[in-house]
């Protein structure tokens, strides 16, 4: 029976613990994230049953630690299958962006990846960050990025973020209306 609770403030979210994807092969994934990107393999969970559902599905869950203490993690389900990209989403949309300390670090990472035969797009200037993009062995788009503006500029962007989103929402509605009108 549902209870009526007094509304409270949301709990404080302190940061990312981990973000997990399916991988085709845990060793191939380990080589990429540990040997090429320098994220140490920090934890491995092996199980035959999914703890949250009880479903039988033998797997290994591997965690790579970032310097801030957060992890990027992967599930190898033992069937040599990577997650499929979303058929309704361009390949550049879904990605994980990992922060490096400087443009010099970004350029060094680009050279290292290209030296390992990885195709790298960029350096791309986003006016607040510079980034490179590439795909991991599982087809996941990875961005390495570094801030290029002072925190005061980011604070200024934050002050008008809601207004910017409101403007996009209005534009999207107008685009949708125009598209609907063109189909009449």
Image: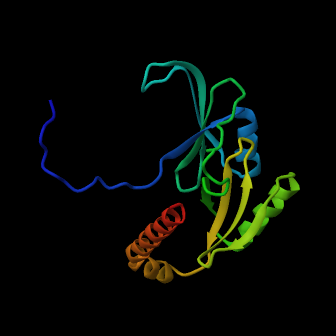
Residue 20 as seen in the image, left or right of residue 7: right
Residue at 65% across, 54% down: 90
Q: Residue at x 44, y 82 (%)?
A: 156
Residue 29: x percent and y percent? 71, 39
Q: Quadrant of the N terminus?
A: top left
Q: Could you say which is closer to the camera, residue 159 or residue 184? A: 184
Task: Work out whether residue 154 or residue 171 is closer to the camera in this orientation and state it.
Answer: 171
In the image, residue 172 above or below residue 52: below
Residue 11 lies, with reference to residue 128, above or below; the image says above
Q: Is 149 situated left or right of 112 in this image?
A: left
Q: Position of residue 6 (x, y in %)?
A: 12, 49
Viewer-side residue, 93 vs 5: 93
- Label total for image: 0
Q: Is residue 144 left or right of residue 181?
A: right
Q: Classify residue 10 by image quadrant.
A: bottom left
Q: Residue 74, percent across and down?
A: 61, 37
> What residue appears at the point 71 percent right and 71 percent down from the top-left corner?
124
Above-or-below relation of 19 to 97: above
Please report the residue visible at 62 percent of the width from the left and 79 percent of the height from the top: 127
Which residue lies most toward the front here?
A: 184
Residue 75, percent across and down?
Answer: 60, 33
* Figure quadrant of residue 51: top left
């Amino acid at each position: 029976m549902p209870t009526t609770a007094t509304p409270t403030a949301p709990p404080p979210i302190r940061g990312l613990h981990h973000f997990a994807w399916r991988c085709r092969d845990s060793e191939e994934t380990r080589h990429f994230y540990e040997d090429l990107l320098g994220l140490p393999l920090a934890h491995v969970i092996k199980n035959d049953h999914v703890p949250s559902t009880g479903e039988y599905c033998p797997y290994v869950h591997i965690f790579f630690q970032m310097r801030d203490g957060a992890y990027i993690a992967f599930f190898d389900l033992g069937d040599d299958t990577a997650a499929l990209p979303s058929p309704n989403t361009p390949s550049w949309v879904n990605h994980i962006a990992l922060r490096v300390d400087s443009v010099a670090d970004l350029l060094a990472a680009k050279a290292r990846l290209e030296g390992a035969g990885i195709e790298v797009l960029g350096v791309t200037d986003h006016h607040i960050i510079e980034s490179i993009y590439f795909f991991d062995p599982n087809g996941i788009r990875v961005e390495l990025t570094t801030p290029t503006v002072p925190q005061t500029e980011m604070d200024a962007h934050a002050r008008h973020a809601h207004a910017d989103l409101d403007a996009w929402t209005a534009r999207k509605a107008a685009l949708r209306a125009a598209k609907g009108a063109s189909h009449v």
